[in-house]
Amino acid sequence: MTSKHWALVGGAVACLKPITLAGIAGGLSLTVAHAAPRDLAFPGYSGYLNVPSATVLDYGQADVMYSDQALDTRQKSAGNTYGHFNNIAGTFGVFPFVEVGGRLTWDRTQSNCFSEGCGIRDLSANIKVQAPFIPENWFTLAAGVQDLGGETDDFESVYVVAGRQFGPFEISAGYGDPKTSGRYLDGAFGGVSYRPVPWLNVMAEYDSQDVRLGLGAASPEGLLPYGMQVKGKVLAYDEGDSDNDRNFFSLGLSIPFGNKPSKQRLEPVDRLMQSHNPTESAPTARIGQSSKATNLEHANTSKTTDSGNQTARRLGEELVKAGYDRVSVASAGDTLYIQWENNIYVRDERDSVFDVARRARAAAGAHKSAQLTLLNQNIPVVERTVPLQAAHPDGSDEPYAIVSSFSDTSLLNRDERDWDFQGSYGPTWKPRITLSPTISSGVATEYGVWDASVGISAEVSASLWTGALASATYNTEIYQTEDFEKGGVFYEDRQRNALIEAEVQQTFKLHPQVYTSFHGGRYAIDWNGGLNETMLLSPGGRHSLSYLGGTFRHRDDTDIERNQMLGRYSYYNPDLDAQIDVYGGQFFAEDTGVRIDSRFWFGDYAITVSYKNTDAEFISLGWVIPLTPEKTRQFRYAQIRGHADWNYSVQSRINEDVNFTAFGGAAIVRSANPIQSLYLNRGRLTND
């Protein structure tokens, strides 16, 4: 840093000194206070103006920002200068101490880079990790990568930064190493922030090339609904090697992502009683164990009065009226036995478990516990034992589970129990129609900033018998940009007006932890064939190993054949509500390699991060948004609903000298209703 730069920083500090002294005189002390609000810097990571901070976005925080500043690294003249370009960045706190984000930068929107030239146009991914276990009254430490895996040299860099908060002040200092020299974060950098009030931020920084001064502001917390905050920044002054006397701005929106707070009610049902002994609170015997004949005899002789049977019948009628299918309720001694199939809480079946537990508790009568069994396609999936009389440990009146387990296969013979009530909300074979938009898009390609083909998909499914399901999916294109029209570069990847899939499947539960499913029909529009999916679950349900294999022939040329042979390892962590799927083997297009899909859940919403490495490498960032209400209505003879797991992602090719346009390999042909989604709540049903 030159003497002129130091003088500018000293002047900025001098300007802040009277405000600082006034704040101290008013009772402020230079001690670590509540963490300052996390904001995005112009490059898309959390920080000041150009400089990153030593903290990350809060867990569950989502920030979207537009700014007009970018470093023009593709100019023909020597050196790098800033320009007024378009920038959109989205960054998410996916884990405690981890943020991931993407940034789209462009100059000309629809120009063809090959024939017209397009200037700067880049899609990049960022990640920053804050070191855990360091007390914040010591310091914070973070490291990050900008333009992860990029080969076009636009914004790629790595950095490490340390910082500390002193009351309204936050200071940071770090070191960066960009791939292109002579730009921000090329060496030592530092920044200081002062917040006289929570919504106002005064910043001064040295980004290794320039000294910058700026202001940031945010709408006060609680002013806007849903926890939203509008944020903005202005670069008021800069002086240095890269630029002088330029002004830039950013405007963004910060919001807690998803609906995780509203899902806290599920914890009493999903968490095993960590501080209670289940054997002391309620019976733990499962329906249909090896001694089921003895248990049934005991249950039949233990029915005390007609009052218990009437309670069971009333509860069964209530569950059917609420919209549940395949409902069976029995009273045996002081226990209610309840089985049901859920088609109304399609976002998260744990909501259904909670709802049935709540209804059982309200209608308990003299019963002390309820044994709950969730069915899917008439196959028992998970059991819970719920105490009906005991108070919840936290003092609330909510139900909680003390036993959780994957259901025994012997429960398939449900006629052996003397049920007091059996019923369903309409016929079990009723057609269920799921609607959702479908999008094929090219983002920041050589042909445009955003090209897309948009369609509407309708899937119709019907339950046939236990474990059997017939389904068909039809798609209609409703909009396309020029490059997706006939003759366009993306025409082959457009949304098609066609029958996408039609199949019949049969699933068997061979063991409480083993499922296998056989599928036959039409897949990927043009391919006839068969699929098998077999899954082995760990006892707790967190881990699973699967095989996804299939053989397909083209419907117009039976000599063209494809084989898919994939292994998959899946892991779900209920504490972090995050999961990962690792695929390896031969994919549908017969390319071989690895694919890693991860989801970070925030209630019914999720952030997705994927990596593909077969014929080329790709990385993508996306989100899952449910397009149906938390509780979906159904009619007596049909059900129409939105897609509960609709997802969209933006993908970029990485580690190539030239970023050739491609939609990526590692394609997987699978049923519209795979085991993980149809039976296991998208992998989120566990015993933990």
Image (cartoon, rainbow, N blue to C red):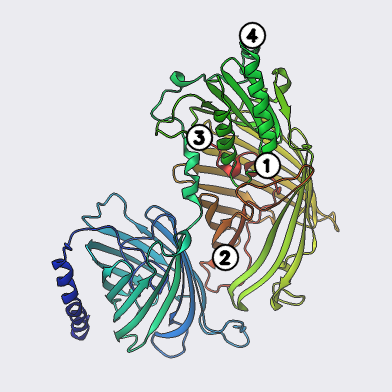
Tell me, yes or no, if residue 485 can be seen here: yes
- CA gap between label 2 and label 1 equals 31 Å
Pointer 2 with pointer 1, Cβ within 8 A: no
Nearer mark to the viewer, of 2 and 3: 3
Question: Dividing the picture into quarters, in which one does residue 683 lie?
Answer: top right
Read off the residue under disc 3.
269
Marker disc for residue 301: 4
Amino acid under disc 1: Asn
Amino acid under disc 4: Thr
The first of marks 1 and 4 along the sequence is 4
Q: Secondary structure at mark 4?
A: helix
Amino acid under disc 2: Val
Label 1 environment density (alpha carbons within 10 Å; few <14, some 14–19, many ≥20): many
- Look at the image and tell me in which quarter the N terminus lies: bottom left
The first of marks 2 and 3 along the sequence is 3
Nearer mark to the viewer, of 2 and 1: 1
Q: Secondary structure at mark 2?
A: strand
Q: Secondary structure at mark 3?
A: helix
Q: Position of residue 162 (x, y in %)?
A: 26, 63
- CA gap between label 3 and label 1 equals 19 Å
Read off the residue under disc 1.
343
- CA gap between label 3 and label 4 equals 30 Å
Residue furthest out toward the bottom: 77
Read off the residue under disc 2.
650
Counting labels gives: 4
The first of marks 2 and 1 along the sequence is 1
- CA gap between label 4 and label 2 equals 62 Å
Q: Residue at x 24, y 62 (%)?
A: 165
